[in-house]
Structures are given as C-alpha cells and as structure tokens.
Image (cartoon, rainbow, N blue to C red):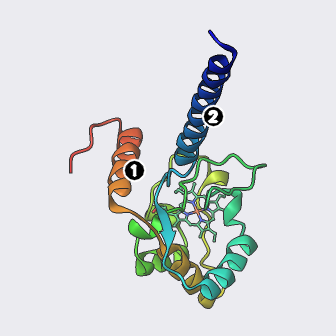
Amino acid sequence: MKKGEKGILVGIIGFVVVVMTVKGWMVSQDEEKDPGIPFYSTAPPEFAAKASVLYRKYKCRDCHLLGGLRNIMQAVPAPSLDGMGSLRDEEWLYHYFSAEDPQSIVPSRLKQRFQMPSFAGIPEADRRMLAGYIASLKVEDWYLEETKKAAYEKLTGKEYQQ
Ligand code: HEC
C-alpha cells in the first residue's frame, strides 16, 4: 500500500469511529430524554407555591413521595402523591383531610404511627388548599391503570379485573 493510500484509509477509519461515537452518544441522550412516568400538575404556579408551603408545614413529606422527593430520614410506606388527583377529586380529598378518623375512609394495615394522621384540627382554609393542590396532581391515564392494577394486586393478592 502506498503512503498516500494508507493516509486515506486511516482517515476513513477515523471518520467512521467518530460517526459511531457521536451516534452512540445521541442514542444515549435519547434514552435520558425518556419522559418516564407522566406526572403533571394543573395548578397555577402561584397556587402551587403557596400549597407547597403547607405541604412542608404539615410534614406530608415525612411520609409521602411527591415529585420524587421525600424526607430521606423517614421510611413510611405511604402512597406516593404524584398523580393522586387522577385518583381522588378535590371534594374527596377535603373530606379525607377533614376526617377525625382517616382510616375509616382508607383502611390501613400499618402501625398507627405510620398511618395517615387526621388533619381535622388544622384551619379549614389550609385543608381546602391542600385538597386543591393534591387534586391538581395528575397522571396520564395509561399509567394510572397500571398503577391501580399493581396496587390492587399488591394489597389484595388477587388479580385485578377492570
Ligand atoms: C405519618 C405519616 C403521614 C403523614 C405525615 C401524612 N400522611 Fe398521608 N397517608 C399516610 C399513609 C400511611 C396513607 C395510606 C393510608 C393509611 O395507611 O392510613 C396516607 C394516605 C394519604 C392519602 C390518600 C391516598 C389514597 O389512597 O387515596 C392522601 C391524599 C394523603 N395521604 C395526603 C397527605 C397530605 C396532603 C399530608 C400532609 C398534610 C399527609 N398525607 C401526611 C401517611 C402520612
């Protein structure tokens, strides 16, 4: 092989390597862009900001996961609140937060200290705002079905029928 030809060959191989590297990188970028679980909130930003203050004030984060965030010191097996608004509406949530005994509405198998506490004693306006906020946390329908099925089967040990 002549010197010039060798140079061209090395050039071609180099080019191929670069193209493959870039392609591989682009594919991995695509995977990172995977939207994952499709949660979203319909709350206006200002309302969401105010409600988050209450959410922190009443320590919901100690037990619940929301937006992937939970107080890492706690390990309570409480349901994630992402997408909760697709499962429960605002009135239901308000009623639940106002109940003296939340377990009469959602039965619990947990030890008492891990159970959903009653928020009947907090100001009504706070309960309303929390209900409005949690009701705004939506999830795409297909994911809700999957979650319902998984939760049902986990809780009951039976197969989920629609
Ligand atoms: C001590 C832990 C704890 C705290 C604090 C807590 N929760 Fe809960 N929550 C639970 C558990 C556990 C459940 C599941 C029912 C049960 O076991 O009592 C639950 C259930 C719920 C549900 C109903 C889920 C369903 O199945 O429909 C909602 C909504 C909810 N919590 C919202 C909140 C909000 C909002 C706050 C803060 C104001 C809060 N929780 C604070 C533990 C907690």
Query: In the rendered image, which residue does mark 1 sit on?
Result: 147
Asked if residue 102 is positioned above or below residue 20 in the image, the reply reads below
Farthest-out residue, left: 162
Q: Position of residue 12 (x, y in %)?
A: 59, 27
Looking at the picture, tell me which residue is in the foreground, 15 or 122: 15
Q: Amino acid at mark 1?
A: Thr
- Mark on residue 18? 2
Residue drawn at point x = 62 percent, y = 74 percent: 119
Q: Which one is earlier in the sequence, the residue at label 1 or at label 2?
A: 2
Looking at the picture, tell me which residue is in the foreground, 129 or 114: 129
Q: Position of residue 2 (x, y in %)?
A: 65, 12
Is residue 122 at all visible to an observer of this figure?
no
Q: Amino acid at mark 2?
A: Val
Q: Position of residue 129 (x, y in %)?
A: 58, 85
Asked if residue 120 is positioned above or below residue 86 in the image, the reply reads below
Quarter of the picture containing the N terminus is top right
